[in-house]
């Protein structure tokens, strides 16, 4: 394990504990996410948006996802296909049957309708204002962002987090992809 990986693991352990505390203290933080997302330039013009179903102590995306659907967006959730290192995004609505996917994360059971999103909302353990996010260590979002850039698909990446998950500087390496925005209960940060 490299020195950077050791430092990332340390940041992950601290960030997991911190986020759990933030969730307990800010149980209604999710209420303002949709209002803050409206601050995204040209929000009305985006049609296909990828989000996620909150997992463990992540800030709840339930109302945010409902808001996107109620505003006529095609909403997608990430799935991890067997032996793939990148995410695929499949259609989701409130009637979609969900099943437990890799790592126990809920995903649509019907994975036949895939889309390339214009906006990708991502979970994170921590973020900094330089545009780096700390994920769970699988690299799925980083590899997906890298792939989408390689095929020249234009998209906006937005980490969704509690404002208190912000740290001064995240440990990162050449594989970590910068994100464009951070959406919190307090504001939408532009990187």
Image (cartoon, grey):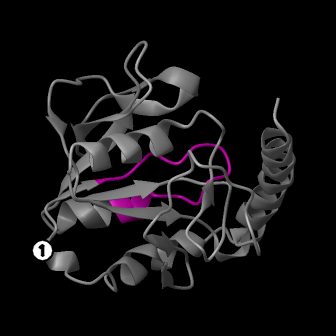
Residue for point 46% across, 58% down: 61
Horizontal side of residue 149 vs 14, given as left or right: left
Whether residue 178 is visible here, answered yes or no, is yes
Q: Note whether 142 is above or below 73 in the view shown.
A: above
Quarter of the rendering containing residue 162: bottom right
Majority SS type along the magenta span: loop
Q: Where residue 175 sits: x, y (%)?
A: 56, 45
Residue beneath disc 1: 45
Whether residue 95 is visible here, answered yes or no, is no
Can residue 62 be found in the magenta stretch? yes
Q: Nearer the viewer, residue 102 or 2?
A: 2
The part of the chain drawn in magenta is 50-65
Residue for point 49% across, 36% down: 140
Q: Where residue 107 sits: x, y (%)?
A: 39, 31
Can residue 31 be found in the magenta stretch? no
Q: Where residue 123 sits: x, y (%)?
A: 53, 53
Q: How many marks?
A: 1
């Amino acid at each position: 394990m490299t020195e950077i990986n050791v430092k990332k693991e340390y940041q992950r352990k601290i960030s997991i504990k911190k986020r759990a505390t933030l969730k307990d203290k800010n149980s209604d933080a999710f209420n303002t996410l949709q209002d803050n997302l409206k601050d995204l330039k040209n929000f009305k013009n985006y049609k296909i948006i990828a989000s996620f179903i909150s997992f463990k102590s992540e800030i709840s995306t339930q109302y945010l996802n409902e808001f996107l659907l109620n505003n006529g967006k095609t909403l997608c959730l990430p799935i991890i296909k067997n032996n793939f290192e990148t995410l695929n995004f499949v259609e989701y609505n409130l009637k979609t049957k969900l099943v437990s996917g890799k790592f126990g994360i809920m995903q649509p059971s019907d994975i036949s309708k895939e889309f390339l999103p214009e906006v990708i909302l991502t979970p994170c353990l921590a973020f900094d204002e330089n545009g780096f996010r700390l994920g769970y260590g699988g690299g799925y979002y980083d590899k997906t962002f890298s792939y989408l850039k390689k095929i020249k698909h234009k998209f906006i990446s937005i980490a969704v987090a509690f404002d208190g998950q912000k740290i001064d500087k995240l440990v990162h390496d050449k594989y970590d992809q910068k994100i464009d925005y951070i959406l919190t209960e307090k504001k939408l940060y532009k990187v």
